[in-house]
Image (cartoon, grey):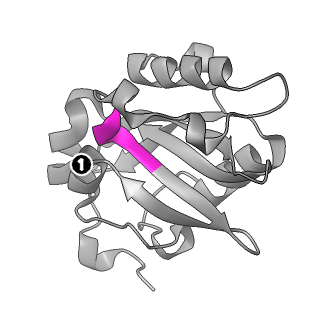
Amino acid sequence: MPSLDQISSQRIRELDSWWHQAGSPGAPPARDAFDPAQFRRLLPYLVLSEVVAPFRVKYRLIGTEVADTSGFNFVGRYLDELIAPGDEEDWPARYRRSFDTAAPVYGINRVATVFDKTLEYPYGIWPLRTKEGAVGQFIALEDYGNRHSLLRQWYRAPLQNWRLQ
């Protein structure tokens, strides 16, 4: 799994800087500390989610670029319901690692295309504390850069082939 040093996204670095400044040593920031107005340029790439027992990630808010690139608005759906065929990233494991360690997780997702090519984009997942003080929410950022339209056009798995349960 890549470290932040291996991620070239300025958007991810910006959100990561906020997360480290807003939190305290060993404790992620509270969800209430995140003010979307401070991050207007990042909002299209953001995903807010919450942990539902026993351990399921439920999407609460997704940015417009995320919805457009994935082809639909998956607010209210669960991560384990949205596994795309051929997606190489183990998304449930990434979220679980962030939850268990109360630390950010960074990665590069590789998406197969209809032209037997692979497009890549960096992402980050940051845990957030609930009002009760425990990790219970996440903020994630998927930085498609200028690849968003290519991802949407060339993505190998049409929406109807996604495992939607």
Q: Is residue 90 above or below residue 150?
A: below
Q: Is residue 81 above or below residue 19?
A: below
Q: What amino acid is found at the position of numbered circle 1 in the picture?
A: Thr
Relative to 58, 153 lies left or right: left
- Residue lying farthest to the right in this orientation: 26
Relative to 18, 154 lies left or right: left
Measured from the top left, where is residue 29 in percent x and y?
68, 34
Q: Which residues are magenta?
A: 42-47
Where is the C terminus found, in terms of image quarters?
Answer: bottom left
Relative to 106, 113 lies left or right: left
> Which residue shows up at 59% across the image and 48% down it?
138
Measured from the top left, where is residue 102 in percent x and y?
78, 40
Where is the N terminus found, in terms of image quarters?
Answer: top right
Q: Which residue is mark 1?
A: 64
Q: Is residue 46 magenta?
A: yes
Q: Is residue 119 visible?
A: no
> Which residue shows up at 29% across the image and 66% down it?
157
Q: Is residue 29 magenta?
A: no
Q: Is disc 1 surrounded by few (<14), some (14 to 19) or many (20+) residues within 10 Å? A: some
Measured from the top left, where is residue 104 in percent x and y?
67, 34
